[in-house]
Image (cartoon, rainbow, N blue to C red):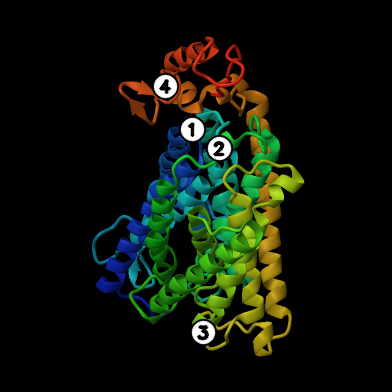
């Protein structure tokens, strides 16, 4: 929805309440992501993984208040590329609570500021899954700040800024307003953006020790993964339906599609698993739900619910196949940010060009509705431009950090556990002995006992057993 639509010049308390609640739901998604990602890591890396999400909240939240909102939604500086960073620095000029309160549609602009802030936060947090288990926390915080400033804030301006001047002429971003790319809630600005950045960092940092060989890289806590997926899905209703910026039929349209697509995506992912591996897994169900949510994000007001089911089924199957590419192409995207967010974001963005219903709130006309290839071409430009911009700039930022302060932890710290080396903490304590770091003395005792000759063991009584950390 266009928050600057002419004629919407009075505040609506119902719309305001809905957007405030939606903003809180979207903020909840980042702790949900911490559980989702944390459960997929090793036991000795779960705290670091969660801290990367919470670190993103802290860094991006500060920058958003200072200049992020102004860069994203301030007056356009040049050709729809970026807003003026100083115009609303520190949210100046939008803090009035009187009759002169600035509005964005039917809600106070300050509420719109908060709603968009949590989008910026989760975009940065999503990237962290691609570089789990091997990243310096301090370097991650620096990357988060630079990525938000150089990549996310400008791309948010491209896609989300639909501002108009006093004459009703567009002064916003070149993709959403200029070209007419349909991206209701962030398939390009959030998911393709984060997925491309994740790919760049995964290539830059290299593979984890034992990638593709060490079974210890399997998820350590699948209930965490399921809990995280549930929190993400719950928050996603605020993400998509909240983007209507009002308690209205458009929000309801987005809400039902946000239910339909991930339901179908779970089935699509599980079908692929069953055919390929012989089992339908809880990890697959959780990942399928997220894949469907990613795909429907740009399209939730452009498709009918039936087409949303089709998109979800396709996205679930496609992403299930895509996550295996990292082994064939030999890059280590630790938690499948590329396979789920980049591939799912592209699928949802391009599917609009095929199945957008002119009777939907987005009013796009896709190929299947007689619109030809025009809309598909616009969607392709939108997806491709964000992908290339994000990948290139993220690689450059990551390379600069690597060359200066270093980006990756030492191999020994990775083996022993990043939680202890980076945070001096352990996620799990057993009788006062943690799983990593403080676990080592117990580990040595067990190793010593196995190295002794044991007359009760069958076979070679003098053999030794190796325990991998």
- What residue is pinned by disc 4? 424
Q: Residue at x 68, y 43 (%)?
A: 200
Residue 462 position in % (x across, y down): 59, 11
Q: Is residue 279 left or right of residue 95?
A: right
Looking at the rendered structure, the secondary structure element under dot 1 is loop
User: According to the image, label 2 marks what residue?
Assistant: 132
Task: Point out residue 254 in the picture as x, y percentages from the top left corner.
Answer: 44, 74
Numbered disc 2: secondary structure: loop
Q: Is the residue under label 2 in contact with that under label 3 (CB below 8 Å)?
A: no
Q: What is the CA distance from the residue labelled 3 to the residue labelled 2? A: 40 Å
Q: Are marks 2 and 1 in contact (CB under 8 Å)?
A: yes
Q: Say if 174 sits above or below 366 in the image.
A: above
Viewer-nearest of labels 3 and 1? Answer: 1
Q: Position of residue 457 (x, y in %)?
A: 52, 19
The residue carrying mark 3 is 360
Real-space Cα distance between discs 2 and 1?
8 Å
Residue matched to label 1: 45
Mark 3 and mark 1 lie on one chain; the one further toward the N terminus is 1
**Left or right of residue 28: residue 45:** right
Residues at discs 2 and 4 in contact (Cβ within 8 Å) = no
Q: Residues within 10 Å of mark 3 (few under 14, many from 20)?
A: some
- Occupied quadrant, residue 436: top left
Given this view, does label 3 or label 2 mark the residue nearer the observer? 2
- Sequence order check, earlier mark of 4 and 1: 1
- Residue placed furthest toward the right: 329
| Foreground of the two, 95 or 299 | 299
For marks 3 and 4 on the same chain, the one whose residue lies earlier in the sequence: 3
Quarter where residue 82 is shown: bottom right
């Amino acid at each position: 929805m266009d928050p600057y639509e002419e004629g919407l010049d009075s505040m609506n308390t119902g719309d305001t309440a809905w957007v405030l609640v939606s903003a809180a739901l979207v903020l909840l998604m980042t702790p949900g992501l911490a559980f989702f990602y944390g459960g997929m890591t090793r036991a000795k890396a779960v705290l670091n993984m969660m801290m990367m999400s919470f670190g993103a909240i802290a860094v991006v939240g500060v920058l958003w208040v200072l200049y992020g909102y102004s860069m994203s939604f301030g007056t356009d500086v040049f050709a729809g590329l970026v807003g003026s960073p100083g115009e609303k620095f520190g949210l100046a000029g939008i803090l009035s609570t009187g009759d002169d309160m600035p509005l964005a549609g039917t809600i106070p602009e300050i509420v719109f500021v908060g709603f968009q802030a949590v989008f910026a936060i989760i975009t940065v947090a999503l990237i962290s899954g691609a570089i789990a288990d091997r990243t310096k926390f301090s370097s991650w915080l620096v990357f988060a700040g630079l990525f938000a400033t150089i990549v996310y804030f400008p791309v948010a301006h491209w896609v989300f800024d639909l501002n108009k001047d006093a004459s009703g002429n567009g002064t916003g971003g070149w993709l959403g307003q200029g070209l007419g790319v349909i991206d209701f809630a962030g398939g390009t600005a959030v998911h393709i953006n984060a997925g491309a950045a994740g790919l760049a960092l995964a290539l830059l940092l290299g593979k984890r020790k034992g990638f593709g060989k060490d079974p210890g890289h399997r998820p350590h806590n699948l209930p965490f993964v399921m809990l995280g997926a549930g929190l993400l899905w719950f928050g996603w209703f605020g993400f998509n339906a909240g983007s209507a910026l009002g308690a209205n039929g458009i929000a309801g349209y987005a809400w039902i599609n946000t239910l339909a697509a991930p339901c179908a995506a779970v089935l699509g992912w599980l079908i692929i698993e069953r055919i390929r591996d012989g089992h339908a897994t809880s990890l697959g169900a959780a990942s399928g739900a997220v894949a469907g949510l990613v795909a429907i994000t740009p399209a939730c007001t452009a498709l009918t619910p039936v087409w949303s089911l089709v998109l979800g089924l396709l996205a679930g199957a496609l992403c299930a196949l895509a996550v295996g590419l990292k082994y064939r192409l030999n890059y280590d995207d630790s938690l499948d940010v590329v396979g789920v967010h980049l591939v799912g974001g592209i699928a949802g963005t391009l599917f609009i060009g095929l199945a957008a219903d002119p009777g939907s709130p987005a009013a796009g006309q896709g190929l299947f509705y007689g619109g030809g290839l025009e809309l598909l071409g616009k969607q392709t430009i939108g997806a491709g431009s964000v992908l290339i911009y994000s990948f290139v700039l993220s690689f450059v930022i990551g390379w600069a950090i690597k060359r200066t302060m270093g980006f990756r932890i030492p191999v020994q710290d990775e083996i022993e556990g990043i939680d202890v080396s980076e945070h001096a903490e352990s996620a799990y304590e057993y009788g006062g002995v943690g799983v990593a770091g403080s676990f080592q003395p117990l580990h040595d005792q067990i190793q010593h006992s196995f190295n002794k000759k044991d007359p009760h063991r069958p076979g070679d009584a003098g053999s030794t057993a190796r325990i991998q950390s």
